[in-house]
Structure formats: C-alpha cells, structure tokens
Amino acid sequence: MAKKARKKLSLLDTLVWIIGIVVYLFLILPILVIVFSAFSPSEYPEFPPTGFSLKWFTAVFGNPQWLDSLWISVILLIIVTPLTVILGTMASYSLARLNFRGKELIQSLILSPLMIPQVVLGIGLLYLFTMMGINGSIIALVVGHMIVCFPYVVRTVSVSVSNLNPVLEKASMNLGATPMQTFYKVTIPLIKPGILAGAVFSAVTSFGEISISLFVSAPSTVSVPVRTFGYIDQTFDPTINAISVIFIIISVFALVIIEKTIGLSKVM
Amino acid sequence: MKGIKIDHVSRIFNDNVALADVSLDVKEGEFFSLLGPSGCGKSTLLNIIAGFLEPTDGLVYIGGNNVTDLLPYRRNIGMVFQNYALFPHLTVFENVAYGLKIKKLPRKEIEERVTEALSLVQLSSFAKRRPHQLSGGQQQRVAIARALAIQPSILLLDEPLSNLDAKLRKEMQFELRNIQQRVGITTVLVTHDQEEALSISDRIGILGKGHLQQVGSPLEVYRRPANRFVAEFIGQVNLFEAVAKKDETGIYEALDYQTDENTTLNLDVGNLVIEQKQEKVLLMLRPERIHISKTLVEQRLNSAKVKLQEASYIGNALRLKVVMNKGELSINTPDLMFETLPNIGDEFYVYWDAKDLIPLEEGE
Amino acid sequence: MRKTKKEKQQVFQWLLLIPTVLFFCVFLVLPFVLLIVLSFRDIDSMQNLLDTYSFSHYIEVFTSDIYIDAILSTLGLAAVTTVLCIVFAYPAAYLLVRAPSRRLRALFYILLVSPLLTSVVIRTFAWIVLLAQNGLINDILLKLHIISEPLSLLWNMKAVVIAYVQVMLPFAVLPIATSLSETNPNLRNASMSLGAGRIQSFLKVTLPLTIPGIISGAMIVFSLAAGSYITALLVGGRMQPIFPLSIYQQVMQVFNLPLAAAMSISLVFIVLIFVGILGLILKRWEARMHG
C-alpha cells in the first residue's frame, strides 16, 4: 500500500518530464526541419529523405541579389552592434547608480521596444524618416535596428551591473581615480561578460530584424531577412532553406559565445 | 503522544555515506536534540524521519508503527523549518489553518484550533498580518503554531533558531522548551549549536561523519564524552595521548607533554584499572578543571610548571593558553585568580584532580 | 565652490545616460507623437493630407465591422496564444529548474534561447515547410496512409496560433523559471508536512507563489501576440482578420497613412490596457507577499 504511493509519485514526475520534453522538442522542431530540408534535393522536403544535396547553397552564393543583401546585413550588424552596446552600457550603468524621479519611466522607455507592437514602431519610423528625407537609407535601418536591439543590451548589462558591488568603485575613487577612470578601469572590466552577451544578442537581433526593416528599407537596402520575406511571400523557394541554415549557424555561434562568456542561465 | 524508533538506518547519496547504520530511540514526550557539525548527517536523519528522504536501508517507527514507506503527508508530523517556511501569500491565520483546511475540518473547529495555537505562542492579535509584516521571532512562533495546530504525533525542528540574533535566540530556546513541556509532545531538534542543545534537551544524540557518536543527557555528553569526536565537539578540551606505566596502577605518561628537557608529565587517573594490553590511552581534561597556583604545588602527579602564551579576558573568566615545553594547555579560570591580567611569559603552576582526567575512546 | 566627489560622480553618470535618452526621445517618443498628430489629420478622397483635424479616422476604426472584427479576433488570438504559452511553459520551466545535472540544464537553456536567436522569418518559414499542402506533415501522413488527401494546414488561424506559441514560448518560460527557482523548497516540504499531497501542495503553494512569473510572462506574450504581423502574414495569409496585419496593408497597399496611424494608436492603447491590468494584478500580488 505504502510502496504503491511512492510509485504514484514517480509516475506523476515522469508525466511532467514527458510533457516538458515534448515542449522542448516543439521549440526546436522548426530548426530541425530547416536543417533537414536545406540538404534535401527535392523542392519540397520529403520524409524519409531521398538524397543529399548542396544545390540550394550554391544557388544562394551564385545569386548577386542574395550577395548584395548579405552585404547590407553585415554592414548593418557592424554599425549597429558597437553603437548599441556603447550607448546601452552607459545607460544601464547610470540607471543602476542614479536615483531620481522618473527613473522607472526612462527604464520602461528603453525596454518598451520589446512590447510595443512592431507594426507601430515600423510606421512611426517610416513616417519620421520620410519627413527627414532619409527613409530607405542605411542610417534609417541603423536607427531602426538600434531601437530593437537596445532592450537586449540593457537587460544583459543591467544584470552584470547589479552584481557589481558599488564599494569597489568607491574604493577606486578613494585611491584617487576620477569617475571616468573608475568607469574604465574598474566598472567596464567587471561587467565585461554582460557587455559581451549584450553585443552577441544585439548582433543576432540586428541580423534577423525584419518587422521595422520592412517599413524603412528601399530596393537598394534590402537586408537578408527582408529579401527572405519577399521570397516566401511570393512563392515557395527552396533556396530559403539554405539561407535559413546560415542564420542557424550564426545563432549556434552566438549561443556558444554567450555560454562560454557569461552562461546562458545568467543572461536570461 | 508517540516515541520514535530509528532502526539501523543508512542513507547513501551517490556513493557518499551520509548516514551509516544509525539506531536510536526517542522516548515519548522527550525533547531530543541531534547535534553535530554541518555535513554530519543530522539533517538527513531529520528528513528521513519527516519522510522527505527515503533511507537506503533500515526502518523508521513512529509510535510503534513502521512509517518507512509512508509519504511525508501521511505521517502527521509537525515540522518547523530553518527559514520558518511560512507561506508568504497567506495571512498568519491562514498559515496556521493550512493543515486543518487540508484535513477538511469544519470551519468552526479550524477557528478554535488556530486561536488556541496562536494563543499558545502569544500571537493572538497578529492573526490578520502577513509573514513579511512580522519580526523574525514572531515568524518563528507562527511556524511553531502552524506545526502544532494539526496536533501532530511528533514535532521536528530543523535549526529553528539559527536565523535569530543571539539574545532573541536565548529567549526562544527557553520558550520552545516551555511550549514543548506544556504540549508534552515528543520533539526532535536538529542543531549545530552545542549550547542550544545542552540547555534545551532531555537527551542529545551527537552525530559525526554519518555515525551516531553518543546518546546521553547534556550532563553525560559533556562530562563523560564517549570518544574523541564528542569531547572535541562539545566544549573546549585538552587531550593527552598517554602511555600506561606498567608498574604503577593508574599512572600514565603524557606523550606530548615534556615539562622540560627530560621530565615528562605524569598523569594520575585514580581508580582506573589499567588493562595490561591497552598501552596507549586518550585522556581528556576540561579547561575549567585546571587550577592555578603561583607557588609550587606539593603534588608529584597532575601538576606542572607552565609559561603563559596567550590570555584573554571574557568577563566572568580568563581564557589562558599555556605551554609546557612541547605541549599546550587551555585553561578557563575564574577572574578572581588574578588582580590584574597576567603578562605573557609569566610562569606559574597548574594542577588538577585525578577524577577530572577522563579516558576516551578514539572513536570512528 | 569645488564639487564634492559624490556630485562629480553624479554628473558623470548623467552624462552617460543623456545620449540614450536623447536617442529614444528622437526615435521613439517623437515618431509616436507624430503618429498621434497624423492620426487626427483629415484627408481628401485622393488621400492627400488636409490641414484640418478630426476624430474621423478613429470613428472609422471603431465603427467599421471589418476593423472591429479584426480587433476582437486579434485579442482572441493573443489571449489563446498567451494561455497556451503559459500552460506549456510551466512544465518546461519546471524541467529547467529541476534539471538533475548542469549539462542537462544547459541543454534546456540552449533549446529555449535558440528560437530567440533565429530570425522570425526563418522560424515562420519552417512552419510553412511543415504545414504546406506538399509539406512535411502531409507528406508523412500520406505515406503512412493515415490520410488520402493532403490536409490544408496552412493559411488559417490555427497555423498562426501554432507558430505564435512556438515563437513566443521562451518569453513565458524564462520568467516562470525565475519565479520557480526563487521559491523556497522548504515551503513545499512545509505544505507536505501539514498533510497536503504533491498535487495539493502544487496548487496551494507553488502555483500561487509563481503567479508573478506567470503574469510577467503573460504580459510579454500578450503584447507580442497582439502586435506581430510577419508570422501572421506568412503563415495565416493575407485574408486573416488580424489587426496589425490590417495596419500593415493600410500602409503598404492602400497608402492611407493617417488611418494607419489611428489604427496604430488604437492598437497601442488596447494592448496597453490589457498589459496594464496584468501589471496592476502583479503589483497587488507582490505587495501582498512582500509588502
């Protein structure tokens, strides 16, 4: 009788575990599907696979349009990431240290792009950039991407800053360092993991950004996600599979970097 | 009211032996403490009694019934946790009523029992507060009331006072004992604080390295420790590793204590009969049993000339550390002994009674 | 007078903050204000902007059946997505927190974060590959002779919900996991020692204590689901009554910017109301627990 009760307990445990694992499989399913179909020779992937082929990859790299888009995406990432990381780090640090009325307002303003409907962000920026006469330019895209990347950087850096003991900074200033020197020599080195994780998030987010880009790009500034969107929207094009695999490889790199520097569990 | 019987219980965590073959009887209505350093297995044993852990081997009886395979919520055990573990989303009243609601008692009875339990811990006027509005001591009382409200057959206390400051802890020790006496419930307390265990318990079980080292009254475990582990864990102690001198009954030679280049310290253990085979023996001497004299003591055994190495004043007593060539001795002496604090390097004489030298087992 | 050390430090910290605040004022607050102004501007029949202002666009939004229908079904979509995300997130968060080894926990984290690091377009594309007429699921079902005709799984609300849940699930798992890991395990033990079984203890102790995590997760998922349009467009098709999608079409196909602005502002406020209510509940609950 009593032994039975113990059994029931582990049955409950098993059930929870099975459901949980199914959920995780559901999360990873799309990525598995993409990888599976990118190497499939037929237009539509078949199960079981009928063969192995790299023709979709050669199709991507033989197409000048895709190469142009890749170039645009990389340039954006290279400009957006450092700018967002520098501004975001400065802001998270001072928000952690300063106390003033309206601080919460500024905090929620910086984090709001996560929650504001993307379509609204897109239209707002489209309208503003048109008035400024810069819509469709690289600058427009950079600004749009920065808005979207900001919350990720501020979140990861804030975690690092909140783990930093302010006494260390006081000690540095007592030893004669100016606030600027202290920031460079004490604060920055100690919150470096958070900054790095923020940079990775920012780069990956920028590379995959579409919701705002769709509104503010011109035919000459089509990033990879926007072109991908165009292809999917028009027809079913299996080269997209190959593009997707490139994206996935980049995310895997990002994951590895984050895990090695700060640990995934700490970032989130 | 029920007793507890632990019958050859072992617990192994991934090849680490947390508890090795522990057998123990807690009598009905007794206040029993499990005392030991951290990692000694005392919490493991408590969790096995509560049912949160299963023993790898052995049986647990409560009130004569084998409960080894019973789930925790079928054991009717009251438990007070280290951080009180009050439910933060419930009021004091709801916390205390929790177990009664689970039992689906009629509302009126629940109210009566909660009121009774809260008045037992003198918190009747706090029923509507939430845990975060209470002080540490008050939270502690709520936890006790909650555990007792279900009228458990036994009460388990897992380091219940470790989060309180020293003064409050003393008060709560007294109160805990008081409540236990009034309710008359069999109680097991887990603690690493020897003073707490000594002052509060009927009996103490000392755990070390997964083994039950000794069970006895506070007086017994302090005055007659079963082995080196217990002697060293409870209170301060001077230990002599000594060798019996075969020709003289009850006379030992302390191995590490040379008073000068060629004289060794001779110890007289009184009536102790030396077994010829057992040559080496471990002897214990409590620091407060050592007397000090400024003049030569007319006593050939159990006395020595010493030099002061360290002295600290703790109000009602002086704590001294003295050396005799190779060996060190700790001494606690009433502060009346000295008009002013002695100087480091002062020389004087120490002596003690034969009955205060206690032979010990090496132990496991 | 010389500034004290503390004042100096504060000036420095303000200097660090100002560029970001300016950036957000110009590129987030300003466009929003411009949109509000634009949403009141009248247009002529050729969609040229006039210099007069009125509520006409808002009246159109809240009186036309199409838009009301779209708003309601968007809220329904967001609500269903939120509930499903929370329900599925709970066991996933439980596994994450209770994972017996660090390696397994790291694996769970990777599975959880990898969708966040993959572009929305790509994840949505994967669902097309899976759900299309000649997609993987139909292919497998046909070959197993479970069905004789391919099912139409794509271009409907169900497909949108499935894709949304997959895209937004991590945002629900992470706060719940944080909440779970912050609850004192002794509370569960205390509940059991008081006679409550595992399920009872979960319902009466663990679940209430993780309500903050559930609500923060719900806030994020709800606002994401109510505001996304890319996934909805690609998986659900252009005909779904989804409000953000209508806004997108208003801008890109009808070119009626003032109406799109009015729709956008309405959407923001509707989302704000729902998220605000959730936030209020969260605040009250936390005040109850921690004062």
Image (cartoon, coloured by chain):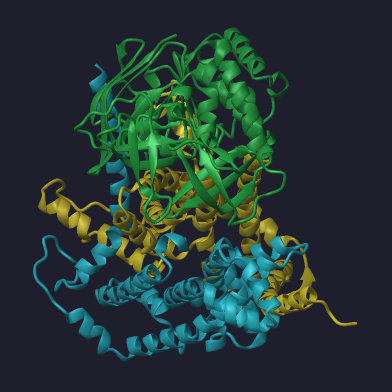
Chain colours: A cyan, B green, C yellow
Q: Nearer the viewer, residue B68 or A38?
A: B68
Residue A231: percent from left, percent from top: 34, 76
Residue C282: percent from left, percent from top: 61, 44
The number of discs equals: 0
Residue furthest to the right:
C1
Residue at 50% over, 81% down: A81
Residue at 63% over, 30% down: B170
Q: Quadrant of residue B121?
A: top right
Residue B204 shows in the view: yes
Q: Quadrant of the N terminus of chain B?
A: top left
Q: Quadrant of residue B204?
A: top left
The answer to whether residue B214 is above or below residue C15 is above
Residue B44 shows in the view: no
Residue at 15% over, 63% down: A46
The answer to whether residue C187 is above or below residue B111 is below
The answer to whether residue B164 is above or below residue A251 is above
Residue at 36% over, 76% down: A228
Residue C38: percent from left, percent from top: 71, 71
Q: Nearer the viewer, residue B132 or B281?
A: B281
Residue furthest to the left:
A50
Q: Is residue B63 left or right of residue B218?
A: left
Q: Nearer the viewer, residue B235 or B206?
A: B235
Q: Quadrant of the C terminus of chain B?
A: top left
Q: Nearer the viewer, residue B9 or C166?
A: B9
Residue A107: percent from left, percent from top: 65, 64
Q: Is residue C53 left or right of residue A13?
A: right
